[in-house]
Image (tube, helix red, strand yellow):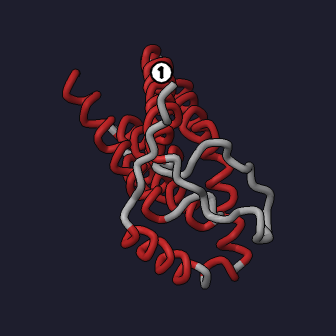
Amino acid sequence: MSEPINISLPPSVDDFDLAIDTGWEYLRSYENVNRVFYTASALGDFSLIWHMLNLARRINNPERRGSVLELSLLLGAESLLVNQGLKRLFRRSRPDMGSRTHPHKIRKPQTSSFPSGHASSAVLAASILSKGSKLAPAYKVLAALVATSRIHVRAHHASDVIAGAAVGVIFTRLINSRR
Protein backbone atom coordinates (compact mmCIF):
# COMPACT_ATOMS: atom_id res chain seq x y z
CA MET A 1 0.00 0.00 0.00
CA SER A 2 1.43 3.37 -0.99
CA GLU A 3 1.94 6.37 1.28
CA PRO A 4 -0.74 9.09 0.92
CA ILE A 5 0.32 12.22 -0.95
CA ASN A 6 0.97 15.25 1.25
CA ILE A 7 1.97 18.41 -0.60
CA SER A 8 3.55 20.98 1.72
CA LEU A 9 3.23 24.71 1.29
CA PRO A 10 6.39 26.87 1.53
CA PRO A 11 7.25 28.49 4.89
CA SER A 12 6.53 31.94 3.42
CA VAL A 13 2.85 30.95 3.27
CA ASP A 14 2.89 30.30 7.04
CA ASP A 15 4.52 33.71 7.55
CA PHE A 16 1.80 35.35 5.44
CA ASP A 17 -0.93 33.54 7.38
CA LEU A 18 0.56 34.55 10.73
CA ALA A 19 0.71 38.20 9.66
CA ILE A 20 -2.94 38.17 8.54
CA ASP A 21 -4.11 36.35 11.66
CA THR A 22 -2.20 38.74 13.94
CA GLY A 23 -3.72 41.75 12.18
CA TRP A 24 -7.18 40.17 12.20
CA GLU A 25 -7.09 39.78 15.99
CA TYR A 26 -8.22 43.39 16.37
CA LEU A 27 -11.53 42.62 14.61
CA ARG A 28 -12.15 39.64 16.88
CA SER A 29 -12.44 41.98 19.87
CA TYR A 30 -15.77 43.42 18.65
CA GLU A 31 -18.93 41.47 19.51
CA ASN A 32 -20.94 42.85 16.58
CA VAL A 33 -18.20 41.81 14.16
CA ASN A 34 -18.08 38.38 15.80
CA ARG A 35 -21.82 37.94 15.37
CA VAL A 36 -21.65 38.77 11.67
CA PHE A 37 -18.69 36.50 10.92
CA TYR A 38 -19.84 33.54 13.02
CA THR A 39 -23.28 33.73 11.41
CA ALA A 40 -21.75 33.93 7.92
CA SER A 41 -19.53 30.95 8.68
CA ALA A 42 -22.45 28.86 9.95
CA LEU A 43 -24.59 29.78 6.93
CA GLY A 44 -21.72 28.69 4.68
CA ASP A 45 -21.70 25.20 6.24
CA PHE A 46 -22.87 22.69 3.61
CA SER A 47 -23.51 25.71 1.28
CA LEU A 48 -26.74 26.35 3.20
CA ILE A 49 -26.91 30.06 2.33
CA TRP A 50 -26.42 29.36 -1.38
CA HIS A 51 -29.13 26.70 -1.47
CA MET A 52 -31.51 29.07 0.38
CA LEU A 53 -30.81 31.93 -2.03
CA ASN A 54 -31.17 29.60 -4.99
CA LEU A 55 -34.58 28.43 -3.76
CA ALA A 56 -35.65 32.02 -3.09
CA ARG A 57 -34.72 32.90 -6.68
CA ARG A 58 -36.80 29.98 -7.92
CA ILE A 59 -39.81 30.99 -5.82
CA ASN A 60 -39.47 34.56 -7.08
CA ASN A 61 -39.20 33.41 -10.70
CA PRO A 62 -40.98 30.10 -11.40
CA GLU A 63 -39.46 29.86 -14.90
CA ARG A 64 -36.10 28.94 -13.34
CA ARG A 65 -37.00 25.25 -12.96
CA GLY A 66 -33.64 23.73 -13.85
CA SER A 67 -31.55 26.33 -12.09
CA VAL A 68 -32.25 25.01 -8.59
CA LEU A 69 -31.07 21.53 -9.42
CA GLU A 70 -28.18 22.81 -11.55
CA LEU A 71 -26.62 24.92 -8.77
CA SER A 72 -27.14 22.14 -6.22
CA LEU A 73 -25.39 19.63 -8.48
CA LEU A 74 -22.54 22.04 -9.22
CA LEU A 75 -22.04 22.77 -5.52
CA GLY A 76 -22.05 19.02 -4.83
CA ALA A 77 -19.40 18.45 -7.52
CA GLU A 78 -17.31 21.35 -6.20
CA SER A 79 -17.55 20.00 -2.64
CA LEU A 80 -16.46 16.55 -3.80
CA LEU A 81 -13.51 18.00 -5.71
CA VAL A 82 -12.35 20.16 -2.80
CA ASN A 83 -13.09 17.90 0.17
CA GLN A 84 -12.28 14.50 -1.31
CA GLY A 85 -9.66 15.64 -3.82
CA LEU A 86 -7.63 18.73 -3.07
CA LYS A 87 -7.76 18.57 0.73
CA ARG A 88 -6.44 14.99 0.60
CA LEU A 89 -3.45 16.16 -1.43
CA PHE A 90 -2.45 18.90 1.02
CA ARG A 91 -3.60 17.56 4.41
CA ARG A 92 -2.83 20.91 5.99
CA SER A 93 -3.56 21.41 9.66
CA ARG A 94 -6.21 23.92 10.58
CA PRO A 95 -5.53 26.84 12.87
CA ASP A 96 -5.68 25.79 16.50
CA MET A 97 -9.43 26.09 17.04
CA GLY A 98 -9.52 24.09 20.27
CA SER A 99 -7.11 26.11 22.38
CA ARG A 100 -8.99 29.36 21.85
CA THR A 101 -12.34 30.32 23.22
CA HIS A 102 -15.00 31.18 20.69
CA PRO A 103 -17.62 33.82 21.49
CA HIS A 104 -20.20 31.87 19.47
CA LYS A 105 -20.86 28.26 18.57
CA ILE A 106 -18.86 26.88 15.66
CA ARG A 107 -18.90 23.53 13.93
CA LYS A 108 -15.46 21.93 13.98
CA PRO A 109 -14.62 20.79 10.44
CA GLN A 110 -13.50 17.20 9.88
CA THR A 111 -11.43 17.80 6.75
CA SER A 112 -8.00 19.35 6.38
CA SER A 113 -7.55 23.07 5.95
CA PHE A 114 -6.26 23.73 2.43
CA PRO A 115 -8.14 24.97 0.40
CA SER A 116 -11.23 26.47 2.00
CA GLY A 117 -14.42 24.80 0.81
CA HIS A 118 -16.48 27.71 2.15
CA ALA A 119 -14.49 30.09 -0.08
CA SER A 120 -14.65 27.90 -3.19
CA SER A 121 -18.38 27.26 -2.90
CA ALA A 122 -19.05 30.94 -2.12
CA VAL A 123 -17.25 32.12 -5.24
CA LEU A 124 -18.87 29.45 -7.40
CA ALA A 125 -22.39 30.07 -6.09
CA ALA A 126 -22.12 33.86 -6.17
CA SER A 127 -20.85 33.71 -9.75
CA ILE A 128 -23.72 31.50 -10.88
CA LEU A 129 -26.38 33.40 -8.94
CA SER A 130 -25.02 36.72 -10.22
CA LYS A 131 -25.32 35.89 -13.89
CA GLY A 132 -27.93 38.30 -15.27
CA SER A 133 -29.06 39.34 -11.78
CA LYS A 134 -29.53 42.84 -10.39
CA LEU A 135 -28.42 41.34 -7.07
CA ALA A 136 -24.95 40.43 -8.39
CA PRO A 137 -23.11 42.91 -6.12
CA ALA A 138 -24.95 41.59 -3.05
CA TYR A 139 -24.13 37.96 -3.94
CA LYS A 140 -20.46 38.85 -4.35
CA VAL A 141 -20.30 40.76 -1.06
CA LEU A 142 -21.96 37.83 0.68
CA ALA A 143 -19.44 35.45 -0.89
CA ALA A 144 -16.57 37.60 0.38
CA LEU A 145 -18.15 37.68 3.84
CA VAL A 146 -18.62 33.89 3.97
CA ALA A 147 -15.08 33.28 2.72
CA THR A 148 -13.38 35.71 5.12
CA SER A 149 -15.50 34.49 8.01
CA ARG A 150 -13.37 31.36 7.99
CA ILE A 151 -10.30 33.43 8.90
CA HIS A 152 -12.23 35.27 11.60
CA VAL A 153 -13.50 32.11 13.30
CA ARG A 154 -10.06 30.49 12.98
CA ALA A 155 -11.33 27.60 10.85
CA HIS A 156 -8.88 28.46 8.05
CA HIS A 157 -5.64 30.25 7.38
CA ALA A 158 -5.83 33.26 5.04
CA SER A 159 -3.98 31.34 2.31
CA ASP A 160 -6.60 28.56 2.53
CA VAL A 161 -9.31 31.12 1.80
CA ILE A 162 -7.38 32.67 -1.09
CA ALA A 163 -6.75 29.22 -2.60
CA GLY A 164 -10.40 28.25 -2.09
CA ALA A 165 -11.56 31.41 -3.85
CA ALA A 166 -9.18 30.62 -6.72
CA VAL A 167 -10.64 27.10 -6.98
CA GLY A 168 -14.12 28.65 -7.12
CA VAL A 169 -13.03 30.98 -9.95
CA ILE A 170 -11.46 28.10 -11.91
CA PHE A 171 -14.51 25.89 -11.40
CA THR A 172 -16.79 28.72 -12.55
CA ARG A 173 -14.69 29.32 -15.66
CA LEU A 174 -14.73 25.63 -16.52
CA ILE A 175 -18.51 25.57 -16.20
CA ASN A 176 -18.96 28.73 -18.26
CA SER A 177 -16.65 27.44 -20.99
CA ARG A 178 -18.90 24.38 -21.40
CA ARG A 179 -22.08 26.44 -21.83
Disc 1 element: helix
Residue 148, given in percent of the width and then of the height, sits at: 51, 62
Q: Position of residue 52 (x, y in %)?
A: 60, 35
Q: Is residue 135 visible?
A: no
Q: How many marks?
A: 1
Above-or-below relation of 127 to 149: above
Q: Is residue 66 among what the camera can see? A: yes
Q: Position of residue 124 (x, y in %)?
A: 40, 39
Q: Which amino acid is tagged 1?
A: Leu
Question: Splitting the image into 4 quarters, where does residue 131 fall?
Answer: top left
Give the image location of residue 61, x and y in percent.
47, 25
Quarter location, residue 48: top right
Quadrant in which the C terminus appears: top left
Identify the residue shown where x is 61% and y is 42%. Answer: 111
In the image: residue 153, left or right of residue 91:
right
Toward the left, the furthest residue is 177
Asked if residue 72 is positioned above or below residue 39 in the image, the reply reads: above
Residue closest to the eye, 94 or 169: 94
Q: Residues within 10 Å of mark 1 (few under 14, many from 20)?
A: few
Q: Is residue 165 above or below residue 31?
A: above
- Report the residue at 49% width, 42% height from top: 87
Is 52 left, or right, of 126 in this rendering?
right
Which quadrant would residue 22 be assigned to in this image?
bottom right
Point 42% across, 43% down: residue = 126
Q: At x 40% / y 48%, what residue is drawn?
A: 7
Compared across the picture, whether 59 is left or right of 19 comes to right
Give the camera-side residue of 116 and 30.
116
Instruction: Identify the residue under disc 1.
Output: 73
In this view, the residue in front, 4 or 111, is: 4
